[in-house]
Image: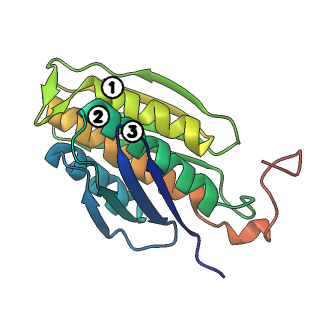
Amino acid sequence: MERRVAKVSRKTAETDISVKIDLDGSGISNVGSGMKFFDHMLSSLARHGVLDLWVSNNTRSSDEHHVVEDVAIVLGEAIDRALKDKRGIQRFGHALVPMDEALAMVAIDIGGRGYFSSSIKFRSSRIGDMTSDLIIHFIEALAANARMTVHAKLISGRNDHHKAEALFKALGVALGDAVRINPRRGGSIPSEKGVI
């Protein structure tokens, strides 16, 4: 089977971002967004989704909002391109992931429609070097540009770092399951319409 790989770049007046994803990878990543906490979260997503991910930020100076948003846009587009016509994929994925006292749930449908629903709340305005509400914005923009439905919930947790990390790990596991090829499908498109 041909590897499902895509590379997408986005250069605007505010950012210069490139992303490459291999949906058939082994969980390696080389992420350089310019924000340590965001890099940690993206690397966790790749490792637990068993996806290979490369992110580079060549922006000279930009605020974190534009960087996070544009990484989400480009990563979403890369996922969508790598999936091509989505032939043979599992389509649905879900995960319930604990991290100490935190518990996150993510469910995904790669059904061609971008939608995001969440009940995510953080206590602090920042987690490490990242504004905490950008985590929600990242997942929302990722869902829209990958044309997938994402439901994300934080079921429990006190520590914001633990909550965010459980969330990104759950996102990775659910995404990895949803993009996985199901050999029982025989290469068919997982939709009654015959197209996603």
Residue 99 shown left or right of residue 107 in the figure: left
The residue tagged with tag 3: helix, strand or loop? loop
Question: What residue did someone put label 1 on?
Answer: 155
Spot occupied by residue 30 in the image (x, y as percentages of width and height) = 28, 66
Comes first in the chain, label 3 or label 1: 3
Q: Which mark is residue 13?
A: 3
> Which residue type does callout 3 highlight?
Ala
> Which residue type does callout 2 highlight?
Leu
Q: Residue at x 39, y 45 (%)?
A: 71
Q: Could you tell me which quadrant the N terminus lies in?
A: bottom right
Spot occupied by residue 167 in the image (x, y as percentages of width and height) = 32, 38
Q: Residue at x 31, y 51 (%)?
A: 42
The residue tagged with tag 1: helix, strand or loop? strand
Question: What residue did someone put label 2 on?
Answer: 103
Tell me if mark 1 has few (under 14), some (14-19) or many (20+) residues whose alpha carbon lies within 10 angstroms of its own.
some
**Residue 4 vertical position relative to residue 74 in the rendered view, above or below:** below
Comes first in the chain, label 2 or label 3: 3
CA gap, disc 2 and disc 3: 38 Å
